Image: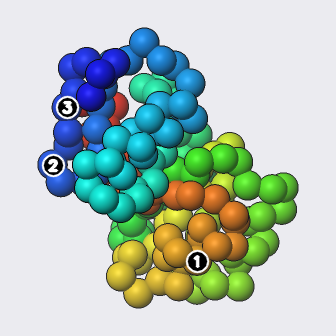
Amino acid sequence: MPGFKNVVTYIQSGNIAFDAKETDNEQLALKMEKKLLKDLGYEVPVVVRSIEELNEVIAANPFSKQGEGDTRKLYVNFLDKAPQPGAHALLLPYATAEEELAIVNKELYLLMPGAGNTKLNLSLIEKKLGVTAAARNWNTVNKMITM
């Protein structure tokens, strides 16, 4: 795609690293969404974060002090915009006793036994918070900064 250089993908996760002169995440996302629609024939939502923002996401992890022996896994939902203040409360009724969640800026951190059986799925998160989201496990988040 014109305007993008050093394009690298991370396995088949939907993650793409690239260099671009454009620095506005929203404009980059729109450009990619238009290209994907043209090439694929259907809409694909895109959420963009800079390497600096990814480093901030890792540093802001509210569950970084997860206790030893805690087998729950950490997931990050990258949101296209910051949700309304108090949005955290909209998701709490869907969390089990084993699930914890926190919203920091434009990210929703979820600590849970696994993504397979949770009610806190991407569709619910997008609907309740009024956002577009892309979920990644913590390992993938950390791999993204090395791409």
Q: Specify the label residue 141 is tagged with.
A: none
Q: Is residue 136 above or below residue 120?
A: above
Res 143 seen here? yes
- Give the residue pinned by disc 3: 8
**Residue at 39% of width from left, 66% of height from top?**
73
Residue type at mark 2 is Ile
> Which corner quadrant of the image does residue 8 belong to?
top left
Give the farthest residue toward the left: 11
Q: Secondary structure at mark 3?
A: strand
Give the farthest residue toward the right: 85
Q: Position of residue 120 (x, y in %)?
A: 54, 77
Give the farthest residue toward the top: 21
* Residues packed near mark 2 inside 10 Å, few (<14), some (14 to 19) or many (20 plus): few
> Which corner quadrant of the image does residue 115 belong to?
bottom left
Q: Is residue 142 above or below residue 139?
A: above
> Which corner quadrant of the image does residue 85 belong to?
bottom right
Q: Secondary structure at mark 1?
A: helix
Give the mark nearest the N terminus, 3 or 1.
Answer: 3
Q: Are marks 3 and 1 in contact (CB under 8 Å)?
A: no
- Give the residue pinned by disc 2: 11
- Whether residue 14 sits left or right of residue 23 in the image: it is left
* Alpha carbon separation for disc pair 1 and 2: 26 Å
Residue type at mark 3 is Val
Q: Is residue 95 above or below residue 129?
A: below
**Residue at 52% of width from left, 75% of height from top?**
123
Front residue (pair 63, 19): 19
Residue type at mark 1 is Leu
Q: Specify the label residue 124 is tagged with.
A: 1
Q: Position of residue 99 (x, y in %)?
A: 55, 76
* Residues packed near mark 1 inside 10 Å, few (<14), some (14 to 19) or many (20 plus): few
